[in-house]
Image (spheres, grey):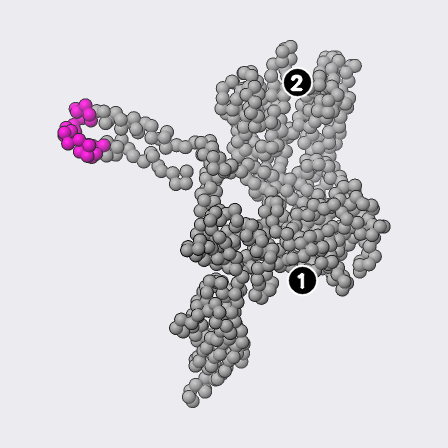
Amino acid sequence: MLNSINLDDKSYQDLMAEALAAIPLYSQEWTNFNRSDPGITVLQNLSAFHVLQQATINEVTEEARRKLLALVGYQARQNRAASVLLQAPGGGLTLPPQYPLRLGGLTFETEREIVCTDWGLAAVYVASQGGYQAISYLLDAQTPAAVFGARPEVGVSLCCILDGVPDTSRPITLWAQCPEDGVRNPFPPTGGPSFAKTRWQYYTRAGWQDAQADDQTCGFLVSGSITLHLDQGDPIPFEEAPVTGCALRCLLEEASYDRPPRLLTLAANLFPVRQWETRAWSYTFPGDTALTLTTPLAAQGNLFVYCRETSGGPYRRYDPFTGITPRGRFYRREDFPGGVTLTFDPIRYGFSPCADPDAVRVVCYDDELIHHRDLGLVYGYEDQEIPLELVENILPDRFMLLVEAPGPQGDLDYFFLPPGQTDPDTLCYEVDPSAGRLFIRHPGYGTGYRLYLCDCCVTQGALGNIRPGGLLEHLGGFDGRSVDQSYRNPSAGWGGVSYESAEDLRLRFVADTRRPSAAVLPADYEDLVARTPGLCIHKVRAVANLQENLVSITVKPRTNDPRPTLSSLYLREIRAWLEPRRMLATQIVLLQPRYISLDVRAVVYVKSYFEDAASEIEALLRRALDYVDGPQGFGAWVRFTKLYQSLLDLPCVEAVDDLRLLPTSYTGISIEGPDLKLDDRSLCYPGQIHLELHTSSDLTRR
């Protein structure tokens, strides 16, 4: 599977030549290699048979590849639609389900009815005992702002003043966009380090009240949504801030941040959309006498109605009443801008749906797919392949078939069937989401079924993870009104996944096998520690003591401290991450980094026409000796000749007469010739720099 051997690379002539060359190795008596010899005839037949079979043997089907990889725990990724949060343009606007919005070639839709209200953020402050510090430039996404100040302390809060009153009957959604600097490792889907404990509140007549919150930001360390339920009373204006208005705040109750959290954007009054396009959909209704369907898909008018007349029984198809036949399975249809109304009249027509909550299913199609809804018959053999015309990149969890089967009384019964069924007495099928195909894995009761497309949504998968700050547009109203409306997405798209072929799955498997998931060698420990979820790891050095079966690991975090050390949280998270991945008998010791200051004394001759040579020389020395923030790792060398040559290469330097490196401590550092060698847990940094500068004319006189 990793590097497959090609078994179909030899011709008949190659096989015969190899067989003839091998005969003397097995028999000294076989000397007649002419075609008339019976043994040669047998070899010819076997070689010909091998040529016929090797192409088939060489081929590994996609289904076989998937099953082999599933044995080692690798399942192919299926299409999954991305989610995006959009900002409501204002109040008085109601968006129905499946409301389409477009960005380039991508279509996004609402999942439910959205009622837009007119409110937003008027101002944002960092509130502390010292007062209110304005960071309202977050609303325009200009520069990052420290959410809780440069040094977060318990009691500090992020205070948001609103310019309207939110609808407390529905959850409200905010989006926090953090700068993506690539410093912090991704947090796991669940768990991970806890750097802070926050509490969301809103202001009422009773003061600050707690709001039930679903905060995905991990204390504003990662971008995410914040959903709040304001169910402890109506909000009222908060008058203590510089700007008056209804207020929300995020109160910091516990804080042990390694780096202070920053925000690039904070947006409010948002609603979600999903990146898919609904080509066909079935809507479920209870068995009332009338129903109203208002969606963009239903407004196209391509619909079929199926009703269940007995509780739990099959569905029967109902047709629109035309006035020709007075009684039968009919409904009366009335179209209006944006939807349709269906009415059932059991007294007049003689048939009607029962009282079940899912007694009526209305299947709607777009103007193109209505002509391709009929998928044909099930012939009764396994692995029957049925193509889906004009459909690809399907969402398997938003796909369904309508099965038409002969009923016992001669009527046609209808059933709604999702993919992935395993009951052998039921029609079982799978969907190829990429190419748009059905595979009948088991035909169920027998033959004679006719299949119709029922639910079908398509997606662009990972392409839906769009960047923030775009404009999604709706051009023309589905309800007959000419409405052009734009919606800004302050959030990036997330969660979109594209279908993974068997070859893509194999490549992912190969990449994962080459990345250590268990620690054996010191390099494995270094790679694993550098990937500890949720932490900011800058440098790692692991050293093995084979006699004691001990691995010593020195870790430098990347924080705002000039010479950071490992906090108790870091020590706990790294050990918890390594514990299930180490060898059973191996002991682990986590060490704090050691920082060694290097003083410099130098006598330098500079060119007389350079005015700021001292600062230029000192900047080079500090940059070259900064192993804390520089690319050098633990245990590096400080090469004297390299530093000396770097000084000579400066445009302002004529000559270097004397250069000395003086460690302030010899613990963790050794002198080897003109160079300095740091041990496996030490990093150096520049200390005091003493420069004695002379002009080039002094060098000439000397």
Looking at the rendered structure, the number of numbered marks drawn on it comes to 2
Q: Could you tell me the amino acid type at mark 2? A: Pro
**If the image is split into quadrants, where does the C terminus sit?**
bottom left
The residue sitting at 70% across, 43% down in the picture is 271
Residue 609 percent coordinates (x, y) = 50, 82
Q: In this rendered view, identify the residue nearer to me: 426 or 479.
A: 426
Q: Hey, which quadrant is residue 422 in on the image? A: top right
Between the residue at mark 1 and the residue at mark 2, the CA separation in whole angstroms equals 66 Å
Residue 582 percent coordinates (x, y) = 49, 49
- Earlier in the chain: of badge 1 and badge 2, it is 1
Q: Which mark is drawn over residue 196?
A: none
Q: How busy is the neighbourhood of tag 1: few (under 14 within 10 Å), some, or many (20 plus)?
A: few
Q: Which element type, helix, strand or loop, lies under badge 1?
A: loop
The residue sitting at 51% across, 59% down in the picture is 554
**If the image is split into quadrants, where does the N terminus sit?**
top left
Is residue 25 within the magenta segment? yes
Residue 352 percent coordinates (x, y) = 74, 17
The residue sitting at 65% across, 57% down in the picture is 256
Q: Which mark is drawn over residue 151?
A: 1
Range drawn in magenta: 19-40
Pointer 2: what residue?
A: 314
Q: Using residue 508 as the reference point, say whether residue 277 is left or right of it.
A: right
Q: Hey, which quadrant is residue 99 in on the image? A: top right
Question: Can residue 236 be seen here?
Answer: no
Q: In this rendered view, identify the residue nearer to me: 372 or 602.
A: 602
Q: Using residue 165 as the reference point, say whether residue 517 is left or right of it.
A: left
